[in-house]
Amino acid sequence: MSDKQIQARYDALLNATADVVMVLEPSGLVLSCSTGTANWIDADAVAGRQLSDLLPADISGEIVAAAVKASEQGKTTKADLQLRPEHVPVLREQGLSETKWLELRCSPAAGQVVAVFRDTSAKRRLERQVTSQAQRDPLTGAYNRRALRPVLEQAIAQAQRYDWVCSLMVIDVDHFSDLNDNYSWDCGDQVLQQLVTSIHGMKRTSDFLARYGDDQFVMFMPETNHEQGMAAGNRVRKLMEEMEIPYAAGDVHFTVSVGVAALNGPDDDSDNMLRRASENLFIAKQSGYNRVEGEA
């Protein structure tokens, strides 16, 4: 087979793949580039340049390391890369407008290395969506109990390490079973949905809201002492007290009771905080509902 025939087959193979393919020197010099279906990289602007001129040091170094390993060991090496537009100005100028996840495969080829960059961004986004759905309550969109536990444990451990403050509140809809009985289960669902929507509208970005039970929610509040936690609990209580939900049988009004607990020393933990907040919630209900109770 002549060199022309070999080159023609090579070119046909490149034209058939959607991946970005580069032929590299192990040192990181790009000898040639085929962009496949990628519109975020300019083949002509890349060829003849060092990877270190195109990418941040950590990313170019990872590609070079994979290329050197492939060349020295004579086998394919793999790596996962993340390209953010703000970190790669050269590629941003060429059209990179969103974060890209790439699967890199480097294979030795006659003293050079063929580097194939496969775009796995769609797969990553789908994986994140599935993970997010597994951590969300399907009715309200709030995080679920499964998602709450690791967040509490990590945040409280961090607060203890750096001597920070934090609080949490347990929110419970008063007489929720009566709402379901007097109106309908659909009405109860709307109450829970509106409660979550309203709290999301008032909480800080750093606060974490999760559905903890049928009509019970937990909101963790970092950098919040007990007094501030009580104030936040009262804002939630007042917001629900003033709310009206239009319903076929008439506008629905409801209230909530809230129990608050704050981090209490280096030996405290998430289980103790949840227990104390639940005890304070019980006191609020026993004291007449539509109340916020905290620690003395």
Image (tube, rainbow, N blue to C red):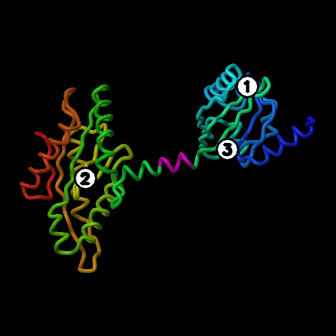
Question: Where is residue 215 shown, x and y percent of the image?
Answer: 22, 58
Residue labelled with disc 3: 96
Range of magenta residues: 123-128
- Give the number of the mark in front: 3 or 1: 1
What's the amino acid at mark 3?
A: Leu
Foreground pick, 135 / 265: 135
When asked about the image quadrant of residue 115, the answer is: top right
Quadrant of the image occupied by residue 250: bottom left
- Indicate the amino acid at tag 1: Gly
Does 59 sit above or below residue 206? above
Give the farthest residue toward the front. Answer: 1
| Residue 220 among magenta residues | no
**Residue 172 location in percent, x, y?**
19, 56
Kindly state the secondary structure of the residue where label 2 is placed: strand
* Mark 1 secondary-structure assignment: loop
Instruction: Give the mark count.
Output: 3
Report crowding for label 1: few under 14, some 14 to 19, many 20 or more residues within 10 A (C-alpha). Answer: many
Q: Position of residue 139 (x, y in %)?
A: 33, 61
Residue at position x 38%, y 51% from top?
A: 134
Which residue is at the far top? 72
Q: Which residue corresponds to mark 1? A: 28
Q: What element does badge 3 sit on?
A: loop
CA separation, marks 3 and 2?
41 Å
Q: Sequence order check: which comes first, mark 3 or mark 2?
A: 3
Question: Dot 3 surroundings within 10 Å: few (below 14), some, or many (20 or more)?
Answer: many
- The quadrant of the picture occupied by the N terminus is top right
Label 2, label 1: how far apart the Cα atoms are: 54 Å
Magenta stretch: dominant secondary structure: helix
Q: Considering depth in this image, is 290 or 53 the residue closer to the camera?
A: 53
Q: Disc 2 marks which residue?
A: 217
